[in-house]
Image: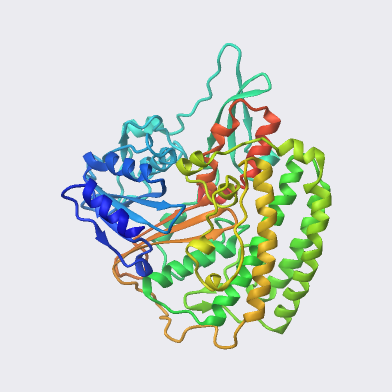
Amino acid sequence: MVERIKAELSAALKGIEIREASYRERGYHLFFEVASGGLLQVARFFDERSFYLAAEICVDYGEYLELVYIFSNHASLCKVKVALKIDPAKPVAPTISTVFDCACWYEREIREFFGVTFEGHPNMTYLFLHEGIDYYPLRKGQIPISDEDKRSLGSFRPGEGEDTFSINLGPQHPSTHGVLRVVLKMDGEYIEEADPVLGYLHRMHEKMAENRGYLQFLANTGRMDYLGAMAFNLGYVTAVERLCGIAVPDRANYVRVIATELNRLSSHLMWLGAYLADLGALTPFLFVFDDREQINDILEPVTGSRLTYCYFRFGGLYNDVDDAFVAGTKAFVERMKGRFSLYEKLVTGNVIFINRTRGIGVIEKERARKQAVSGPVLRGTGIAMDMRKTEPCAAYGEMDFDVPVGTRGDALDIYHVRIKEMENAVKIIEQALARLPEGPIMTEKAPKKLKPPKGDVYHTVETPRGELGIYIVSDESDTPYRMKWRVPSFSNLMVFPELAKGNLLADAVAILGSLDLVIPEIDR
């Protein structure tokens, strides 16, 4: 597919040099630079070939700002990086939100952190920042926020019509699981508009990355997706290893798979209990916490934590697993196999649960592509894309498992996908335990102080919530020049406003819960 896309790009974009990149080193296959006037043509080119916009990133190089667009495909592995340079004094670029819906939020985030104005954008109000911000946080140097942008800070005001009123769902409501606020415009019991308001927990992880060494930033990964911290930890270390060309011993790769899948199980169990509690059923919550405690008891002795894991290191692991870990994991796997029948009786066949979720929050395949949703939400629509299969890291390429998909794309399908993924996690853990090799857990050549070669990398992994993309720009120093986190909860939340329209307030809770959002991951 890469060769075909390159040929078609060369034919469609006269005068632009399409260059090949080392996918193994960079995480993308092709890259080229485009002028501002040709950006929409490029976006339409990829849209017509069923690509999705995986990430939209801004990097401040001082003399210019560079917008980076990563286009990817669900059907076949093909990643293309497109760069657009703009004037830092008057940063203006055309919007591509008219082609890819997900660009609407991506561009709003870039606007508030870098000051880039996107011409033709339907809503340039801020997502995260508040009135006390004086400078664009991710620009190099203190660049004051313009007067026009200051008027956009805190500019969201819920509107009301003659027969409508606005209410807040969150940030204290139990169903928003943290500090997510959604302003709902209601006509009686029915939702006319749903506007997420973000930033209540924003901690500037991407800014922290520019002021810390690569090893010092390791602890930050578990503070984003605290329920799937192991996958975020895995994504970060494998991205840096890819950038630096660091090899990892086989034993470490297999242990990484076991630990990450145990954490995936833990995360899905938490979702299951919390989702049922949102819908009014409290009993499953008690059962899932019983299972989660078993996982925590296994992981705590080797990782030193029960939640915000930071177990992996560049080139291997913090420490090795022992016989007690292996025996405890095997015992838990056998226990978990018997628990699925319990959840089948308790939840899957429950007529009340079925009626609350069937036909609710239906996501069509085309909408899933335009909004760049991922993970179980994407697979619930019938698109069988899982980064563990498409772009395997660690020892995932050695594992045999299916990718479960739905048929309707509703909340019930997404539930079934997650249950099947829990069963898959058990199978993967069994395979990894059976093949666990002897040997070192740390490469001998891992430098104590990392200074990656100059360049960039875009690396993806499959977290419990979907596609995590990490973009790192290195200037050969011991700190990242730029680090961008493309997190799945942020992309998956984008689809909620459309799904909520016309539904009852009670159904909005069922839709929101099916997305399995982690709010610190969204805010970062």
Q: Residue furthest top?
A: 162
Residue 201 shows in this picture: yes
Q: Is residue 347 left or right of residue 142?
A: right
Q: Nearer the viewer, residue 374 or 234?
A: 374
Placement of the N terminus among the 4 image quadrants: bottom left
- Quadrant in which residue 431 is drawn: bottom right
Residue 35: image location, x then y, percent? 21, 45
Q: Is residue 509 left or right of residue 377?
A: right
Residue 177 shows in this picture: no
Q: Is residue 484 left or right of residue 189?
A: left
Residue depicted at 65% across the width and 58% down the height: 421
Residue 123: image location, x then y, percent? 41, 30
> Does residue 222 lie above or below 417 as drawn?
below
Residue 150: image location, x then y, percent? 37, 33
> Does residue 421 lie above or below 368 as drawn?
below
Residue depicted at 51% across the width and 42% down the height: 368
Q: Nearer the viewer, residue 159 or 461?
A: 461
Residue 297: image location, x then y, percent? 74, 70
Residue depicted at 34% across the width and 59% down the height: 2
- Quadrant in which residue 102 is drawn: top left
Q: Nearer the viewer, residue 211 or 489?
A: 489
Q: Residue furthest left?
A: 15
Count of marks, rendered view: 0
Which colour style is shown?
rainbow
Q: Nearer the viewer, residue 304 or 108?
A: 108
